[in-house]
Amino acid sequence: MTDKKVRVRFAPSPTGGLHLGGVRTVLFNYLFAKKNNGDFVLRIEDTDQTRYVEGAEQYIMDCLAWCGLTPDEGPLVGGKYAPYRQSERKPIYREYAEKLVMDGHAYYAFDTAEELDKCRKEIPNFQYGQAYRHTLRNSLSLSQHEVDALLDAGAPHVIRIKMPTDENISFTDMIRGHVSFDTNLVDDKVLLKADGMPTYHLAVVVDDRLMNITHAFRGEEWLPSAPVHLLLWKYLGWEADMPQWAHLPLILKPDGHGKLSKRDGARLGFPVFAMNWFDAKTDELTPGFREIGFLPEAFVNLLAVLGWNDGTDQELFSMDELVEKFSIDRVSKAGAKFDFEKAKWFNAEWIKKSEAVSLKSNVAEVLADKGIVVEDEQYLLTVIDLIKDRVTLLPDFYTQSIYFFESPKEYDLAAVKPKWTDAKTTFFKAWADKISAMETYEATGLEADFKAFMEEQGFKMGDVMLPFRIMLVGGKFGPHVFDIAALLGKDETVSRIEKALGAFTA
């Protein structure tokens, strides 16, 4: 397969929100494809119509678009292997399922749901496989005449793979190396359901073959299904075209015990979905990384290093750097613990390194949600540059910048009043007068004038610098106080001094 163009795919089921583990699977597929000048295919696995959720497919596409993981082929962009929704490929699969039956590798099963439920209740650890298949209603236990009569009558049935006895099935995983399975431990999976739709097991093999997929990266939870898929590639005569597989490590709970779930996120107070997901069936809204204030660059970056590293101490990677440096042999076999504090660190670092102009629309949206509309674009860009080093999540831009758009409504009086004196009141009244008389008003000159006037009046920095900050912003936070004063302008600075003095001396 080395002479073939690299083709990878992400094949989600439209059944709910997109877990960050799913996005990481997309990311690793995408990076591998781009690193090797290949194609990244999006294929929607909507064969289980009972679990299909309205809006989930569009949600998946929106998540990928937000992350910048654009498919080369898929339901929206098309491609020469269309259609890319399995429900639209339904007629294709029966042909292959019937061929497996004809070749003795699969069989018809006519058991009802009630009959199978009875078996599960009466037989501990019941599996539909070599131990019980000949006692059930299928084409292995019934006569040919009975089978033909049932088929002719349109009796509901599924097609199951016939797992061989006493065989060892193995393959080489790109991450885990040699992996083998005992066929005696694998049940006869359903390949084609009674409604004519394929299960994942049949569909993934047929579609990977027909779409010329060369590499299949998926989560390690799919490893138990590998022997079924290996046999299907073999039984359909396609072994030479089988993709190389890599089973990615799980993303674990923060304590390292078990796979990270939506419930864990709810319990621990952080999202596990890429974007907000609203389930119309349950009226449940599950928060996403985008909506709590993550940049897509940070989200992609933090996922990339969950289970992968480039062999150096580098932690911050742009998409271009990830494409350049990504290698599947640097992906760990072990699960990666999710650390939300570290995730927030990535976001803070990406906000710091982002240009103000690239943050502008996000910040404007954050402010607009609080009723603040900034019409002066340059003013907004200057504010962003002043405070972005202090921001962790995008909503922090509001709390860190509100004083640039409106005068403080409250003051941290506990930090000021215990040491307040009449002399300080006199100092700040005189300082306000000096500001009003200034011909030039910029941060460097303002700082020099303030220090000179402070010394002239017999004060130290510790006496008057914090009160000046609290007058302008309301609390003990924000960037350099003279940068704040310069941006607010003379009149606003004087107004805030006068207003604050009223509160300080009340």
Image: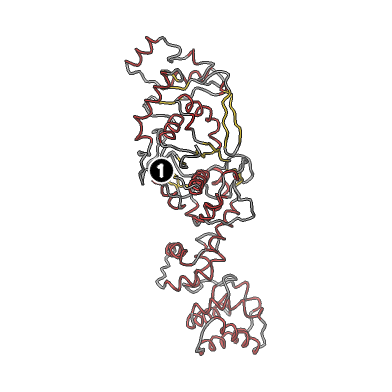
Whether 371 is drawn above or below 212: the answer is below
Q: Is residue 323 left or right of residue 315?
A: left
Q: Which residue is drawn at 35% across and 33% down?
A: 89
Question: Which colour scheme appears in the figure?
Answer: secondary structure
Whether 333 is drawn above or below 35: the answer is above
Crowd around label 1: few <14 · some 14–19 · many ≥20 (10 Å): many
Q: How many marks?
A: 1
Nearer-the-camera pick, 147 or 293:
147
- Give coordinates of residue 41: x percent, y percent: 43, 43
- Give coordinates of residue 335: x percent, y percent: 61, 42
Nearer-the-camera pick, 176 or 406:
176
Q: Quadrant of residue 480?
A: bottom right
Label 1, secondary structure: give it.
helix
The residue tagged 1 is 56
Whether 439 is drawn above or below 478: the answer is below
- Give coordinates of residue 45: x percent, y percent: 42, 37
Q: Is residue 225 left or right of residue 280?
A: right
Residue lying furthest left: 153
Nearer-the-camera pick, 116 or 180:
180
Nearer-the-camera pick, 194 or 117:
194
Quadrant of image for the C terminus: bottom right
- Give coordinates of residue 497: x percent, y percent: 54, 81
Q: Is residue 153 left or right of residue 174?
A: left
- Give the amino acid at mark 1: Ala
Residue lying furthest front: 3
